[in-house]
Amino acid sequence: MQRFLLVVLVLSLLIPGAVFGQEEVNKAGSTAANFLKLEVGARAVALGGAFTSIANDGTAMLFNPAGLADFQKPTFTYHNVDLYADIRQHFTGIVIPFGESSAIGVYINYVNLGWIYRTDIEMQRRERGQYVFSSNSAYGFSFARRLTDRVLFGVSFKYISEKYWNSSATNFAADFGTVYTPGVGGLKLGLAIKHLGPEMKIDEGPDFTFFKRQEEAFPGNRQLPSRLILDKYALPTTFSGGIAFDFVGPTSVVLPNDIHQLTLLTEINDAFDAPFRSIVGVEYMWNNMLSIRGGSKQNYDTFKYSFGGGIKIPIMNSEMIFDYAYADYGDLEGVYVTSIEIKF
């Protein structure tokens, strides 16, 4: 009976679109710092982003900081990807566990939007040989602690910076997360609220101060110093809830196995600027060393599917993990992602 109930629970959650429904509310383009929504880590990308419940590598600081509480060794994580439209993303993170149930971490999430032709608004033409450079970055600090033998809690604070040629904007935000492990069948439940902070606006830089032009009908009027004031925009605050279930594995109550592990994952995302979305992922691991993964998203504009794999290489008392992923973004193009993690 216990096995039957677990299977029913997981299968129902693997069809979140049918269980929860999808409300077509789309506020795309209404938020600031949208680079925060880019998924980091080849393992997470291969799973379609269904990572809130099993976030146990350095990218947990972005997905669900509660996952850091399970770290046993100091860990270094690096992620690199060339996205569509010449966008490049780098993530570097370090996690250090201390005591028996706590960990801290720091990270840099940097997104380079590349060079863009400078356009003259009045002449409606490109300025020959002139380009605009844009970049976004987030610097974060995370803390996690095991509250009980089944509950993990974590929080991340981040400083956000957006730069567009001579203009920039800065802000602060926080992420909160928890992981609950019932202790049955490798079941894990994860909840996270991300990018929670005040509104943000671009108001720094020399281009916001100018002299108002004289009216042609009154040539004697002097020019007055003026300042351009822009509107504030909310951050892309997102609530994520995920579940992971070991259908096969050492802790599985369906098909126990010490060599093979098959984990089914599902996740729902409710964002300020997007309609209700859901994700389904699956991960197979052999002998806790080789992995194959796949993922699919529902109600996303361009994402179609993703897949990838990883290998864990023991080196004396350390471990080195290489992960790879491919994500198909439809009209935008496919993206190849690589990540490396070292546990000392």
Image: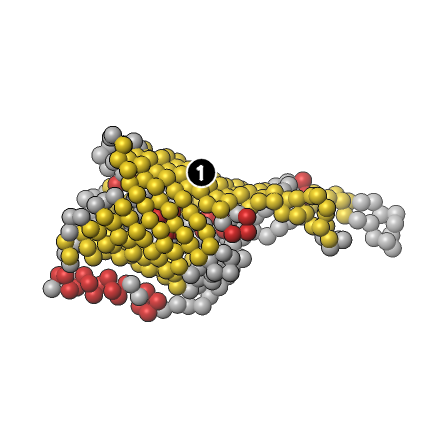
Please, what secondary structure does the residue beneath circle 1 have?
Answer: strand
Residue found 29% across the figure and 63% down from its top: 14
Q: Nearer the viewer, residue 185 or 61?
A: 185
Q: Amino acid at mark 1?
A: Ile
Provide residue 85's location: percent of width, then percent of height.
Answer: 55, 51
Give the side of residue 124 with respect to residue 313, left or right: right
Give the side of residue 6 with respect to residue 64, left or right: left
Q: Residues within 10 Å of mark 1 (few under 14, many from 20)?
A: some
Q: Nearer the viewer, residue 139 or 303?
A: 303
Provide residue 266's location: percent of width, then percent of height.
Answer: 31, 58
Quadrant of the rendering where the N terminus is positioned: bottom left
Provide residue 168's location: percent of width, then percent of height.
Answer: 59, 42
Q: Nearer the viewer, residue 344 or 231?
A: 344
| Residue 1 in sight here | yes
Task: Give the residue at the far left of this rendering.
Answer: 1
Residue found 62% across the figure and 50% down from its top: 230
Provide residue 234's location: percent of width, then percent of height.
Answer: 50, 53
Badge count: 1
Give the side of residue 128 with respect to residue 312, left or right: right
Q: Where is residue 94, by image quadrant?
A: top left
Residue found 39% across the figure and 67% down from its top: 22
Model colouring: secondary structure
| Residue 109 in sight here | no
Quadrant of the rendering where the C terminus is positioned: top left
Residue found 36% across the figure and 54% down from its top: 307
Q: Which residue is mark 1?
A: 108
The vertical placement of 300 against 116, above or below, is below
The vertical placement of 204 against 199, above or below, is above
